[in-house]
Structures are given as structure tokens and as C-alpha cells.
Amino acid sequence: MDITLEKLTVVFRDRSGAAVPVLDVPSLTIRAGQQVCLVGGSGSGKTTLLNTVAGIVVPTTGQVLFDDAGDDKIALDVASLSEAGRDHFRAQHVGYVFQTFNLLQGLTALENVSLPAHFAGRKQSEARERARSLLDRVGLSHRLDARPGTMSVGEQQRVAIARAVINEPTVVLADEPTANLDVANGDEVLGLLKDAASESESILMLVTHEPRVQEHFDDVRPLHEVSR
Amino acid sequence: MSLWRLIERSLAQRKLSSVLTAFSVALGVMLVAAILVVKAEMEASYLKPGKGYSLVVGPTGSPLTLVLNTIFHVEQSKGLLPIRVYEEMRTSRLVKHAVPYAVGDLFRGFRVVATTDGVFHPYFPHPESATTEGKFSSGGAFVYDPLALVASVAVSVGNAVPEAARGAAALNQAVVGSAVADKLDLRVGDKIEPTHGVESTTAHAEQMLWEITGVLERTGTPIDRVVFINLDSFYRIPEHKGGVRVKADGSAEATVSSVVVFPKPKIAKALLLTRLRQREDLQVAEVRSELSKLFKIVGNVDRVFVVVAAMVVVIGVISVMVSIYNTMNERRREIAILRAIGARRSTVMSAIVGEAAVLSFSGALAGLLLAHGLVAVVGPYIEQQAGFSPDPFRVLPLEIPLVAVVTIVGALAGVIPAWKAYRTDVATNLAPLS
């Protein structure tokens, strides 16, 4: 599936009700399986862009199309879906990796990873098996029952990567995934993230402000070129 | 990873708060259930003794007091009735069986009832048995001699013993209820000495002993706590002289406290009631009707208790809502994460409502256990005060619906915080914490 953003604008309202334009993307297409690094500074709309693709933020205007390039040529506009429809879409098509990991503290690593599979309607045994294999893939087979609070930041981000790809999503969205990590951990996590996205044949959309992260990508797009 | 596991983890994360919230529900349920159990036990214990009795005849006064005094062996006797009323009842063609009671003595805290051997007749409802022998766990009935009664009564007021009764002498004999025998470790052949008076107990001036001839089977009624002695021996006690009336012709006549009357079947009871109600020298109490009046009084009181306890349950359920609602601020991020990784709004709402339901359900279950524990703890006190011992293991059919209702109401209370969860803005709450 390709992702196409068409004439996308996001405008927030401040407390006084005044319009604050956050994002204006005339056109952006990312092909199936592509790994793209979107680079921008603070306040450039990086997170809003990812949230819009994930269906968390509804654009003010424009379309977020998930376009099946196959024979059927089915295009799904996430922006036009209802709230429940976007929830369902997210469970099936989106994996999310956050800067602050956002793992659920009460759950073990295995439970954190298998949770999106439960939301996507997968069988529990199947979800656990896949979660186990993904944690093994990111080198955490010995930490299945560990709670996030007992893990290092590098380990937590690896759990988050495994969680993002468990449903083999159409797109993995990564929001500053290395911002809280040291260089060594950051490089390792980036490698794992790219491999995991590639193994699940997902698009990888990563946003960052760090120049060193760009070096890991062939396709680097400054956000100011994408967004007006 | 099921919804149940999410709920379980969420509750485990706030263990102390969860336990305290469930406990507040448990307290309310405990009060409601304990009141209902004690009420049911009280009704059973008051209905059971009343079962099988029909009418009680006594001196004029309160019919309820007459019933309570005669059947439940509580309250004071309100006067005396000439024994001829008993004779009248016994010989009436409308009456199947009649038993006189003379009360006023105690034996180590247990009431003494002087009566005839008619109290052991199969017609007498407790202990239930088709034979007199079947009513005893050991021994048998005492000997009652009507002529000895005549002799005792004459002697007590210093009259000459009538010709027919000469040579008749009362034997001092007693039959004890099962609780009396158990608590005082009494057996057939033991001798007891009742004391005078029901409230202030003093030994009779002249030491007199009564020999136990039998121990009654357990009935689960106040009879278990009674010492029966033969009426003919009762008037041998000098202090009971006041219970003997000297008639105008100088002859002596015994009095009794009441007469338990069992009318013949069908219309006899109605006829007897009509006749007795016209009398001014006595009153008749219909046991069933007096008990239903009593339950009406008691019912109104315990309804107030149930309402108060139900309010405690409501407060407990509200505490479930408040407890979850107060955690919503700190849980907004958690909810946003769940939504970002694919949880539907309805899933998040269900988890919150489920949490409220689990807290209420576990509180209600714990409340039931506490209620039965409470009944066990206060049982001896209730027995002492009210004359019945509630069974802590008695499970009322109402307990299951009680748990269900508390769970449902608790789940409904969870809808308010769940609605807050439903409205949580995902994007805002996913932002890194500064």
C-alpha cells in the first residue's frame, strides 16, 4: 500500500479561538515498503504529521489516502473515517514508536508487545507467540516478564519497536525514537527499527531533528520542503 | 492479553486504593446482608415456636404480652386466672386439649413453668412427636396428680385437705429443655432448686428440691430454655400462697398465669373465640394474629435499618466512582497510549466500567463473607438479648441478587469516569512529558 497526502492542512485553535496553522502539505507520496526520514526542527509539525497519518488527528482539509496499488485500486481516506473507523484502521494498519516509548507500566514486556494484536482481533495464543518471537528478534528473550520500570531506556525502546510491528502494519510511524537514547543505543535501535519495518514489509516514516539519524536513511526529506 | 487482564493490571497497579474502595462497598453489603440474615433468622425463630399453637387464654391485658409470656417465655405475667378456667377449657366440647401455665420462678437464669403432664401430650406442638416418649431425649414425663394439687392448694392457705384428696401428695419433679440440660449439664436424676421471682431471684425460704425425670428433645424454640415442674408441686412452695384464692365458701382455689388451648378442628376455634371474647374476666389471644402484629412492628423497624444500610452501600458504590474518577488525570496518558496502539474508545470505556464492576463485585462478595462473620460474632449477644441464635451459615436466596445488583450499580457508577476516558484527547496526552 502507498500512502498519499493530498492538500493536507491542519489548523489548531488557541485559547482565544484564533487559528494556528500547524501543517500544510500540498502533496506527499510514500510508496509501499519505503523508509523515509522527515527532518524538521521543533514546532515544524512533525508529530502532527504522524498523528494525522495515524488517524489520531483529523486534518482540517485534505486527504490521507492509503492506496492499494494492486488490481483493485482501493484507496482509503483515513480523514473521512469515523472515530471508531479510525480506531479500527489504526489497529490494523499503524504501528507507532514514540520518543518516550509510551509502554504501559503495569504490563510486562510480553504483554506490552502483544496488546496491539489483541486490539487487532488476533487470537491470544497467536499474539503471544508472535510477541515472543519479536522480543527474541530485538534481543530481549530474557526480559519477557520484565516491567518497563525495571528496563533500561534502550530495552524499553526495543520493546516499543516490537510492539509497533506485531500486526505487520502498513506503516510504522516513529516520532523521534532516538531522542532519549545515547548514540550507541540510538544506532542500535535505528537498525532494529529499519530491519523490523523491512521484515514486516511496512512503510517506515520517521521524524527527527537529529542530523545523525538522517545518515541511516537513503530517503531524507526536510519537512520545510514537504510542508509549506 | 484480554480486557480482563487490562482491568486486573490496572487494579493491581493501584492495589491499596482498590482494596480500600472494595472495602467501602463491602461494609455496606455487610450491613445489609447481616440485617437480612438476622431478620430472617428472627422471623424463623419467632414463627417456629408459634407454629402449632392456636389460642392462649389469660388474665385481661395485652394479648401480645400474653402470647410472648406464654409461648416465648419473655416478659412478665400480667396477672392470674382461676384454675377453673383451665378446667372449663379442658372439658369444653370445642376444645381438643388444654394446658395451664403457672410462672414466676427461675432456675439459674432459666424460666420455670409449672404445668400439667398435658404439656407432654402429642397434641402439644413442641417437641414434635406422635408419642409422649418421643418428646424426650432421656427420661420421661413428671407425675401430675390433680388430687395432689387440691391437697397442696388447701394446705398452702391452712385449709383442711378435702376428703377426696386426702393421702394425695405431690412429688417434686421437673422436666428440663435441651438447652437447660446442655448449659447446666443436667441429667435425669439430678436435683434442682428453683428461685423465686423472674427478675429479682431469691431462694425460697424453705429449701425444696425437684428431681429431674426427663430431658426434652431439642426443638429450636424457647421451650429448650424452660424448666417444667408439675403444677401440684408448685403450690407446696410457701411463697406461692399468694397464687391461691380463698373463695366465699372458704374453699381454696389455685390460679394459673395462662392456659394454652388447642380447639377441635373446623368451626370450633371460631365459636370458642366468639364466646371467650364476650367474657370480661379473661382475655383470649389468637397466636397467629398476635405474631403477625409483632412482625408488623418489627418489620417497620428493620426496614429502617435496611434503608440505612442500603445508603451505606450507595456511598460505597459512589466511592468506586470517585476513586476511579480521581485516577483519570494520571491515567490520561495510559488511555492515550492504548488508543494510539489500536484500542477503540469502546474498549477503553469497557475497561473502566469493568474495573468499577470488579471492585463492586469483589466488595459485595467480601461484604457477604463479613456479614456472616458478623452474625457469628454477634450471635451470642443476640441470643442473650432476643432469645434466638441466628445461624451464621444460613445463606439467604436474596444474597445472590444483592451481589448482582451491587455489581450492576457499581458498573453504572463507572460510566462517569469511563465517559471521561472516552473523551480523552489522544494527541495532547501522547506528547512527551516535560
Image (cartoon, coloured by chain):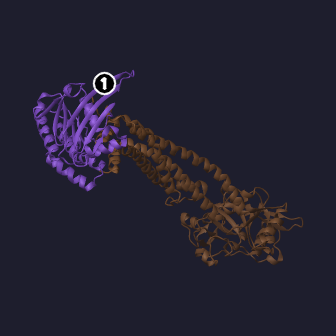
Chain colours: A purple, B brown
The answer to which of B148 and A81 lies nearer the viewer is A81
User: Residue B229: percent from the left, percent from the top?
Assistant: 67, 68
Disc 1 residue type?
Pro
Image quadrant assignment for residue B109 = bottom right
User: Residue A191: percent from the left, percent from the top?
Assistant: 12, 39
Residue B145 visible somewhere in the drawing: yes
The answer to which of A86 and B143 lies nearer the viewer is A86
Which chain does tag 1 point to?
A
User: Residue B281: percent from the left, percent from the top?
Assistant: 84, 61
Q: In this picture, is B235 found above or below A137?
A: below
User: Residue B315: percent from the left, percent from the top?
Assistant: 50, 42
Q: In this picture, is B372 found above or below B330?
A: below
The residue most toward the right is B249
Q: Mark 1 points at which residue?
A: A21
Q: Quadrant of the C terminus of chain B?
A: top left
The answer to which of B241 and A129 lies nearer the viewer is A129
> In the visual, does A204 lie left or right of B304?
left
Residue B75 visible somewhere in the drawing: no
- How packed is label 1: few (under 14 Cα within 10 Å), some, or many (20 or more)? few
Image quadrant assignment for residue B344 = top left
Q: In this picture, is B167 found above or below B361?
A: below
Look at 25% across and 38% down and name the residue there. A102
Determine the secondary structure under disc 1: strand
> In the visual, does B84 lie left or right of A56?
right
> In the visual, does B60 lie left or right of A151?
right
